[in-house]
C-alpha cells in the first residue's frame, strides 16, 4: 500500500477520535481545526517511522496528544480540558453511582470540568485518554510510562476528584 493510501485510510478510520482529542485541548473551534490539521501533518511526516511496536490507533493517539500539547505551546499549563456531557466514558472518572445522584448533572459536570482544568498537564493527558475509552495499557503506550504507573495516577486523580466533588457538594448544601 502506498503511503498516500495508507494515510487516507488512517484518517478515514481515526478522524473522529483525532477531532475529539483536539476538542479536549482547545475550546475554540478555529483553533481545533488548526490543531487537527497540525495532527494530520505530523501523522503524514511520521508515518514512514511507524514501526508497528504499538497498535496504529495507539500511535495516532500519541501523535494527536503530543501535537495538541505542542500546539498550545507554553500556555499548556493553563490549558483547559474541555469535557462534553455526552461523553460515554465520563462516569468512569467518578466510578460512583451514588455521588452522581447526589449532585445535579449540570452542576457536577461544571465542577468536574473546573477540577479537571486544575490538573497537571500529564494528568490532563491521562484523563483525556481515559475519556476516549483507552485501556490502561494503551494509555501507558501513548504517554510513555508504565501501565502500573498509569493505574496509580488515574486511581489517585479519581480519588482527588471524588473528594473534591463530595466537598463541593457539602459546601453547596450548607
Image (cartoon, rainbow, N blue to C red):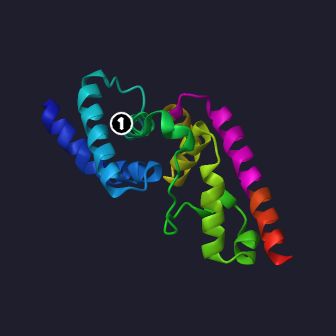
* For residue 2, side relative to residue 113 (left or right): left
The residue lying toward the viewer, choosing from 168 and 149, is: 168
In the image, residue 142 above or below residue 112: above
The residue pinned by badge 1 equals 56
Can you give x and y, in whole percent of width and height, for residue 113 in the image? Answer: 60, 59
Let me know if residue 157 appears in the view.
yes
Q: Quadrant of residue 77?
A: top right
Q: In the rendered picture of this protein, how many numbered marks are placed on residues?
A: 1
Quadrant where the image shows the C terminus: bottom right
Q: Which residue is located at x 58 percent, y 48 percent? A: 127
| Residue at the image position 69 percent from the left and 61 percent from the top | 95
Report x, y in % for residue 31: 34, 49
- The x and y percentages for residue 142 are 49, 34
Mark yes or no: residue 92 visible: no
Q: Nearer the viewer, residue 20 or 75?
A: 75
The secondary element bearing badge 1 is classed as: helix
Front residue (pair 52, 94): 94
Q: Which residues are magenta?
A: 143-161
Crowd around label 1: few <14 · some 14–19 · many ≥20 (10 Å): some
For this orientation, the residue located farthest to the right is 174
Residue 77 on the magenta segment: no
Magenta-drawn stretch contains 152: yes
- Per the picture, the main secondary structure of the magenta-coloured stretch is helix
Q: Is residue 62 left or right of residue 174?
A: left
Horizontal and vertical percent position of residue 123: 61, 41
Q: Is residue 136 above or below residue 91?
A: above
Q: Quadrant of the N terminus?
A: top left
Eyeballing the image, is 13 above or below 59?
below
Amino acid at each position: 500500500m502506498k503511503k498516500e493510501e495508507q494515510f487516507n485510510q488512517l484518517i478515514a478510520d481515526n478522524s473522529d477520535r483525532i477531532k475529539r482529542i483536539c476538542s479536549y485541548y482547545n475550546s475554540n473551534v478555529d483553533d481545533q481545526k488548526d490543531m487537527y490539521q497540525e495532527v494530520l501533518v505530523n501523522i503524514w511526516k511520521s508515518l514512514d517511522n511507524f514501526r508497528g511496536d504499538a497498535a496504529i490507533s495507539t500511535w495516532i493517539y500519541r501523535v494527536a496528544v503530543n501535537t495538541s500539547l505542542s500546539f498550545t505551546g507554553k500556555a499548556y499549563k493553563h490549558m483547559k480540558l474541555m469535557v462534553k456531557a455526552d461523553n460515554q466514558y465520563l462516569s468512569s472518572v467518578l466510578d460512583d453511582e451514588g455521588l452522581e445522584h447526589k449532585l445535579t448533572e449540570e452542576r457536577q459536570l461544571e465542577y468536574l470540568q473546573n477540577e479537571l482544568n486544575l490538573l497537571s498537564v500529564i494528568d490532563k493527558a491521562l484523563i483525556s485518554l481515559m475519556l476516549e475509552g483507552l485501556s490502561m495499557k494503551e494509555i501507558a503506550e501513548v504517554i510513555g510510562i508504565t501501565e502500573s504507573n498509569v493505574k496509580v495516577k488515574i486511581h489517585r486523580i479519581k480519588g482527588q476528584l471524588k473528594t473534591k466533588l463530595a466537598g463541593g457538594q457539602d459546601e453547596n448544601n450548607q
